[in-house]
Image (cartoon, rainbow, N blue to C red):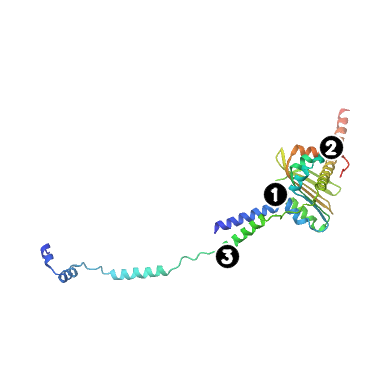
């Protein structure tokens, strides 16, 4: 009997822990009103990685090396004041429980942006960006095995690239 | 005391009589002790185990059912979110857009840091000029 109860408790703990991640947050809020949501699966990332001419696109930063290492991307952009607070607090809880490290925090003109990564010095296993304003919350979560140097170079290249190319 | 030969000559009835006559006297309180022992045995047999709080019977079954449900839920295919794009080119464009958003936010942060750095160097320069005079 005790064993069963312990097993059940362990199972519930596991389920509880598993419930708090980018996927669960995405699933919870993606269907809400005034929320735009984008999910790209590992299968789609593999498919993108196999497209040969993406690497030769001119004028754009080549994302292909990083894309090949990604296994999931979740984007939520909420303009729904009823859920903005809970979305924000849930992302913060997920960050705290996931051993994420703060990469950058900037507060400007009423907007607070925080970026977090989890992984080692060489590999990034997860990246989270949370940008919150009074009326809008943006959550970007990337999962994968991204080489840290490659990821940082890519972001730096995008920064120097200037104008958005999409 | 009879000899062995005499004993062999005795009939069964005589032997029985001899045995009854020669039996050692029973202890005085034997009957009472026997009664007490039998009564105690009855009491012990009738006594139930100390009342322990027994868990309800349904708990293990519920636990097993919950575990099975959790297993089924976890194993169910296609429970994850659906891909937002069917076309890899569109998906790529969205990834590109996401990286641009990240970069924009990052460069915004860097800009603030740069401004803060400039603001911090100004008092230092003033101090240096004052000290050099």
Front-lying residue, A51 or B23: A51
Instruction: Depth check: give the residue in front, B5 or A42.
Output: A42
Point out the image quarter for the N terminus of chain A.
Answer: bottom right
Compare residues A63 and B26 and report the one nearer the observer.
A63
Above or below for B73 versus A97: below
Mark 2 neighbour class, 10 Å CA radius: few under 14, some 14 to 19, many 20 or more: few
Disc 1 and disc 3: Cα gap in Å?
34 Å
Dot 1 and dot 3 within a common chain: no
Of mark 2 and mark 3, the one earlier in the sequence is: 3
The chain to which mark 2 is attached is B
Q: Residue at x 77, y 39 (%)?
A: A65
- Disc 1: host chain: A
The x, y position of residue A68, in whole percent, is: 75, 42
For disc 3, the neighbor class at 10 Å (few under 14, some 14 to 19, many from 20) is: few
Q: What residue does disc 2 label?
A: B117
Q: What separation in Å lies between label 2 and label 1 (alpha carbons)?
A: 33 Å
Q: Residue at x 80, y 55 (%)?
A: A84
Residue hosting label 1: A97
Q: Nearer the viewer, mark 1 or mark 3?
A: 3
Q: Secondary structure at mark 2?
A: helix
Q: Nearer the viewer, mark 2 or mark 3?
A: 3
Disc 3 marks which residue?
Answer: B58
Subunit that carries the residue with mark 3: B
The x, y position of residue B125, in whole percent, is 87, 32
Callout 1: SS: helix
Q: Secondary structure at mark 3?
A: helix
């Amino acid at each position: 009997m005790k064993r069963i109860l312990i097993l059940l408790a362990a199972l519930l703990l596991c389920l509880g822990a598993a419930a708090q991640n980018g996927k669960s947050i995405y699933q919870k809020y993606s269907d809400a009103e005034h929320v735009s949501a984008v999910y790209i699966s590992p299968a789609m990332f593999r498919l993108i990685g196999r497209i040969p001419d993406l690497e030769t696109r001119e004028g754009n930063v080549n994302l292909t090396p990083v894309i090949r290492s990604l296994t999931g991307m979740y984007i939520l952009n909420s303009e729904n004041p009823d859920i903005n607070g809970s979305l924000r607090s849930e992302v913060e809880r997920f960050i705290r429980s996931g051993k994420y490290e703060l990469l950058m925090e900037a507060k400007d003109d009423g907007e607070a942006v925080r970026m977090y990564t989890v992984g080692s010095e060489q590999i990034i296993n997860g990246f989270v960006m949370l940008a919150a304003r009074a009326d809008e919350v943006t959550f970007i979560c990337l999962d994968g095995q991204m080489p840290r140097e490659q990821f940082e170079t890519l972001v730096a290249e995008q920064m120097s690239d200037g104008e958005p190319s999409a | 005391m009879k000899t062995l030969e005499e004993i062999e000559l005795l009939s069964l009835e005589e032997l029985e009589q001899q045995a009854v006559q020669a039996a050692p006297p029973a202890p005085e309180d034997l009957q009472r002790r026997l009664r007490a022992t039998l009564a105690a045995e009855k009491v012990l047999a009738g006594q139930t185990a100390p009342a322990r709080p027994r868990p309800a019977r349904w708990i293990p079954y519920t636990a097993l059912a919950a575990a099975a449900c959790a297993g089924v839920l976890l194993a169910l295919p296609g429970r994850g979110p659906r891909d937002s794009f069917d076309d890899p080119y569109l998906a790529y464009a969205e990834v590109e857009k996401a990286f641009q958003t990240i970069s924009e936010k990052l460069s915004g942060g860097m800009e603030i840091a740069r401004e803060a750095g400039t603001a911090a160097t100004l008092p230092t320069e003033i101090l240096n000029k004052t000290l050099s005079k």
